Amino acid sequence: MRNLSTVDRMTNEPFSIHENFDTVLKQISKAARSAGRRAGDTHLVAVTKTQSPNALREALSYGHRLFGENKVQEAEQHWNDLKKEYSDIRLHLIGPLQTNKVKDAVTLFDCIETLDREKLARALADEMKRQARNIPCFIQVNTGEEPQKGGILPHELAGFLHFCRKDCGLAVEGLMCIPPVNEPPGLHFALLRTLRDSLGLSCLSMGMSADFQRAIMLGATHVRIGTSLFGAR
Ligand SMILES: *Cc1c(COP(=O)(O)O)cnc(C)c1O
């Protein structure tokens, strides 16, 4: 199934989003199998930030329905109309969320992967009540303890989880991390998995284009992939 409507911005070569999905899904299955896991245990969150309407349509025509965006406003532009057309689209927020965008985020997204502070937890809980929409959340963990990065520090995670559940009533289902760019990601993935296991959560969102196979070996249930599907941004 060739579909040459898109040009890779790095090489100027036409390439096919459908073929990229084939390739990535095969790589996911293979990594899962070699880790003794079932392929269906890892969900592909196709990251569509900065992509064209055409690219979104191609992913949909491939049959894919699970997408990630890192900005609320761009996500609305991308998905408001398409979500009416395809009722089974599921959107994950994978970027930082400001409290003044919480209302729009709760309206649009089906999972918030970047729950990372008490003020946001309270705002999400209030808004979900208002909209009668209980969206699952993942807590973002700052595994590299980087000052400029969002996320809960590992030693504060148990307390924060308790706060989100007991004080706010949020449905926290998993953990998410973005490892430091200049470090091998494996240690961070392993740490996130250990934290997840110790807290009895089910989901682990980790791994991007450069390292998703490693993340799957270490237990990822959600990999967030943009470049390998849609080309360089
Ligand atoms: C952009 C982004 C991704 C996808 O990265 P690629 O390297 O393009 O696969 C994954 N996670 C987050 C949080 C992102 O912002």
Image (spheres, rainbow, N blue to C red):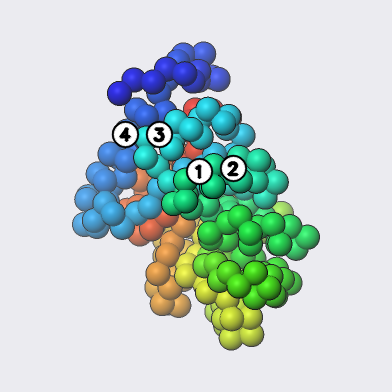
Can you say which quadrant of the picture contains the C terminus? top right
Q: Measured from the top left, where is residue 185 in percent x and y?
A: 47, 50
Determine the secondary structure under disc 4.
helix
C-alpha distance separating marks 1 and 4? 24 Å
Task: Residue under label 2, please give it.
Answer: 81
Does label 1 or label 4 sit earlier along the sequence?
A: 4
Q: Determine which of the numbered discs, if any, sits on residue 22 in the image.
A: 4
Check whether the beta carbons of the residues at disc 2 and disc 1 lie within 8 A of each other. yes
Observer-nearest of 21 and 134: 134
Note whether residue 83 is visible. Answer: yes
C-alpha distance separating marks 2 and 1? 7 Å
Does label 2 or label 4 sit earlier along the sequence?
A: 4
Residue 198, by quadrant, is bottom left
Does label 2 or label 3 sit earlier along the sequence?
A: 3
Note whether residue 146 is visible. Answer: no
Residue name at image x 51 percent, y 13 percent: 12
Q: Measured from the top left, where is residue 211 in percent x and y?
A: 43, 43
Task: Residue under label 1, please give it.
Answer: 85
In this rendering, the label closer to the viewer, 2 or 4: 2
Determine the secondary structure under disc 3.
helix
In this image, 62 relative to 39: left or right? right
Residue 113, by quadrant, is bottom right
C-alpha distance separating marks 2 and 3? 16 Å
Task: Residue under label 3, please give it.
Answer: 61
